Image (cartoon, helix red, strand yellow):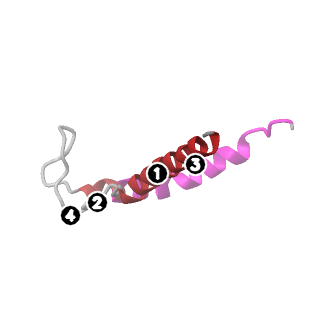
Amino acid sequence: MCLQLRRALYKAMAIAVACLAFSAFAADPKPPAKMDEPMAGKMRKPGMKQSDVKKEAQKKSRAMKPKIEKEEKEMPHAPK
């Protein structure tokens, strides 16, 4: 009796794990953003595309890099 109950429990657990694993693998990840589409939202400028934001962020990062490196060198190091 106990052996049959244990086998049934193992089968139920195996089925549950298989269902969870299958659902995790079957879920589609979020598709990548389409950079050529116009931006959504109120903060956008007319004619602005999604890729424009990324380009502007990279441009600003390049401009700020020397300033950030200079500040990092001037900062005192924390004791270990």
User: Nearer the N terminus, badge 2 or badge 4?
Assistant: 4
- Kind of residue at disc 3: Arg
Taking 8 as reference, is 76 left or right?
A: right
> What residue appears at the point 19 percent right and 54 percent down from the top-left corner?
48
Q: CA distance from mark 2 to mark 1?
A: 45 Å
50 or 14, nearer to the observer = 14
Q: CA distance from mark 4 to mark 1?
A: 44 Å
23 or 5, nearer to the observer = 5
> Residue under circle 2?
51
Residue 65, x across and y down, in percent: 55, 54
Dominant SS of magenta comes to helix
> Residue under circle 3?
7
Q: CA distance from mark 2 to mark 4?
A: 7 Å
- Kind of residue at disc 4: Asp
Q: Nearer the viewer, mark 3 or mark 2?
A: 3
Q: Which residues are magenta?
A: 55-79
Q: Nearer the viewer, mark 2 or mark 1?
A: 1
The disc at residue 23 is: none
Taking 23 as reference, is 3 left or right?
A: right
> What residue appears at the point 72 percent right and 48 percent down from the top-left corner?
73
Taking 66 as reference, is 80 left or right?
A: right
Please state, as top left, top right, bottom left or bottom right, where the C terminus lies in the image. top right
User: Nearer the N terminus, badge 3 or badge 1?
Assistant: 3
Residue 47, x across and y down, in percent: 13, 55
- Kind of residue at disc 2: Ser
The disc at residue 36 is: 4
> What residue appears at the point 20 percent right and 44 percent down from the top-left corner?
44
Q: How many neighbours does mark 1 have within 10 angstroms: few (below 14), some (14-19), or many (20 or more)?
A: few
> Residue under circle 1?
15
- Where disc 4 sits, the SS reads loop
Q: CA distance from mark 3 to mark 2?
A: 56 Å
User: Nearer the N terminus, badge 4 or badge 3?
Assistant: 3
